Amino acid sequence: MIYLDNAATSYPKPDRVMEEMTRCMREYCANPGRGGHAMSIESGKAVIEAREVISSFFNFSNPLQLCFTKNATEALNIAIKGCLKPGDHVITTCMEHNSVARPLKTLERDMGMQVSIIEGNEFGEIDPQDIKKSIRQNTRLIICTLSSNVNGIVMPVKEIGKIARENGILFLVDAAQGAGTVKIDVDEINADMMAFPGHKGLLGPQGTGGLYVREGLKINPLLQGGTGSNSENLYQPEFMPDVLESGTLNTPGIVGLSHGIRFIENFGLENMELYKYMLVKRLHEGVEEIRGVKVYSKNDMKKNTGIVALNFIGTDSTQISYTLDKVYHIATRAGFHCAPLAHRTLGTVETGVVRFSVGCFNTLEDIDRTLDALREISRKL
Amino acid sequence: MIYLDNAATSYPKPDRVMEEMTRCMREYCANPGRGGHAMSIESGKAVIEAREVISSFFNFSNPLQLCFTKNATEALNIAIKGCLKPGDHVITTCMEHNSVARPLKTLERDMGMQVSIIEGNEFGEIDPQDIKKSIRQNTRLIICTLSSNVNGIVMPVKEIGKIARENGILFLVDAAQGAGTVKIDVDEINADMMAFPGHKGLLGPQGTGGLYVREGLKINPLLQGGTGSNSENLYQPEFMPDVLESGTLNTPGIVGLSHGIRFIENFGLENMELYKYMLVKRLHEGVEEIRGVKVYSKNDMKKNTGIVALNFIGTDSTQISYTLDKVYHIATRAGFHCAPLAHRTLGTVETGVVRFSVGCFNTLEDIDRTLDALREISRKL
């Protein structure tokens, strides 16, 4: 199997991820922060270490400004619903995933929030000035994906963050595609909040993710429950991260995530970006020479986080993806990728796209075998 | 280390749990339901199998009426917030965990819901007739824990469920303490919804849990996002389980949970209950003979899911627990256990309690060594 579905979830994971998860579960996995005994303390320490690894990776100084979530979707919902009130206006883009679009459309329908969606060019790139022009008196929040999960396009988050800051508007970044591939400094992009999954580029297990919240910003929690802190209080504590972390954390998952990130740091994040782009470039240049193929991604390291999205004109994306799987044992994803707005932008509402998303365990040989398969498919169409 | 903190999280887990989680992550852990390739299908199949294991374990016929959550707290929040509207009245009990009490108190404060809390006897047992008497015209929901996480007392959920059904009121059961120890049949207890954690009695990993929702009952989702279904739709699909499962699931965790439950089934659930009670009985009878000890749990298999809660009168619970850990390497939990209402009922608001919670990997020798330690502590006080 050649696995080119890393934008859905990365595979394989570094050995250390599974090893440390198993060691955690076998040796010390009590409930972190829920008791004073030795194992509970060791479990709590492992969670704190993971906070430190992540805060250092995204360059924020206080590890307590991170709340762990089960996935990026939960983090995005916490962020969006935790800072908006009825009547607020939100600006977002045409390339957002359903994890941003669906909460917003629901708030618009049910709670009277207003939503502006900024359109982009053929790749989905937006002009930050279009965001600026959409700002209203009641604009409370701007949300932008770091990079599209459909075609990998990189969005101008730094410029958007600057506009948000200058206008006193909160800025939420969805780093689901891109975290672990490109350098992210939450201060440099002026992010007030940033959501990320653990199981994609960060090489951690499914069931993990997080939300960074800028110090001083108060978010209303989506969940209330046991926090192990202020146990005698019938209301949620108001301090981070407890305010946003109700119920038992996924300790082994968090340990696994921290070792995924450590793997990236050992590999070198810059090397990770270069390596993935090397694969994308080879694939991109190869498919462009195949008759009948239309590519929706940019062949530019600074504009692509590791995806080649394409179609064979006139053929449904699911048919290509099915053939790649069944005949060639190449795993890709076809269809709509939970981002209907993006497909409107790319002009693929009818067909979807075949998405090839590379990971750091793919090789040039994987890419060459994929290109061979695509050439053969093209000949037979 | 003698681990007697199984009510916080069970430890150890059956070997098979870690083995199957690792195998999942190493061999097939793509994104379930997010692609058509072989690995994604295998991943999806593992999730479906887990749904079947769980639905069979709790005796509901349609496995799709289960949504997976990150913990019981999330499941309880989904259930509570998904079926209430401002002005609704809720009845609950004095033994609820903060994962029930905090969401309710917050809804009461911020959204105009009304909450009645039924008081119990010295063990926290409530009289179902007191619930009946508290029903109002606008009572929408009754919530009761299956068993207290503080002292293990078993609540009369079957009788309460009957009252709820007869009065057309929804009934939500919090099975955080008890699932995996006692037989639960959601129909027999008339539960419309039941929340459970994966990492306690069910012997699965942290990061797992679920919510059963009776067929036909519509719950508004707390999260919206990618579901892998109706991808082209900017609103959440309305069918179970997708309506309540946004974002990538914790596939390895869910696989681990299903193997935790299979372990219980092989052991035999009735044997599990008997075995745990054998340990509790020995501990209970032992501590009752120690001078100065007050016990807050019942020594009755049908009234206790595996906890002995106690204090040395005049000594803070944290001091006892600390000594047990440091001197005797016995892990217990002291303090308030995220259930302030329960401590009011038990008369332990000032002291908390020392909680000994047994698991199926504890032995009679563990209990005897614990009793030796407690006798020695008693002599030195």
Image: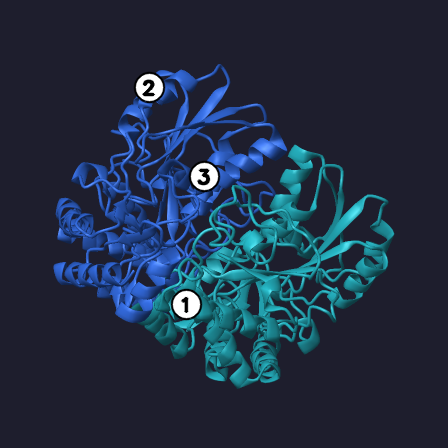
Chain colours: A cyan, B blue
Percent of width and height locating residue A94 = 70, 53
Residue at 29% from the left image edge and 51% from the top image edge:
B49
In the picture, the quarter occupied by the N terminus of chain A is bottom left
Residue furthest top as drawn: B137
The disc numbered 3 marks a residue on which chain?
B
Percent of width and height locating residue B353 = 35, 49
* Rendering quarter of residue B26: bottom left
The disc numbered 2 marks a residue on which chain?
B
* Rendering quarter of residue A58: bottom right
- Are labels 1 and 3 assigned to the same chain? no
Residue type highlighted by circle 3: Val
The disc numbered 1 marks a residue on which chain?
A
Residue type highlighted by circle 2: Gln
Percent of width and height locating residue B3 = 27, 62
Residue type highlighted by circle 1: Ile
Q: Which residue is mark 2?
A: B129
Above or below for A295 versus B261: below
Q: Residues within 10 Å of mark 1 (few under 14, many from 20)?
A: some
Q: Secondary structure at mark 3?
A: helix
Give the mark nearer the N terminus: 3 vs 2.
3
Q: Secondary structure at mark 1?
A: helix
Q: Is residue B242 in view from this perspective?
A: no
Percent of width and height locating residue A44 = 44, 66
In the displayed structure image, the side of residue B106 where residue B199 appears, left or right: left
Disc 1 to disc 3, C-alpha distance: 26 Å
Looking at the picture, tell me which residue is in the foreground, A355 or A165: A165
Looking at the picture, tell me which residue is in the foreground, B345 or B260: B345
Residue at 26% from the left image edge and 45% from the top image edge:
B295
Q: Which residue is mark 3?
A: B100
Q: Which residue is mark 1?
A: A41
* Rendering quarter of residue B256: bottom left
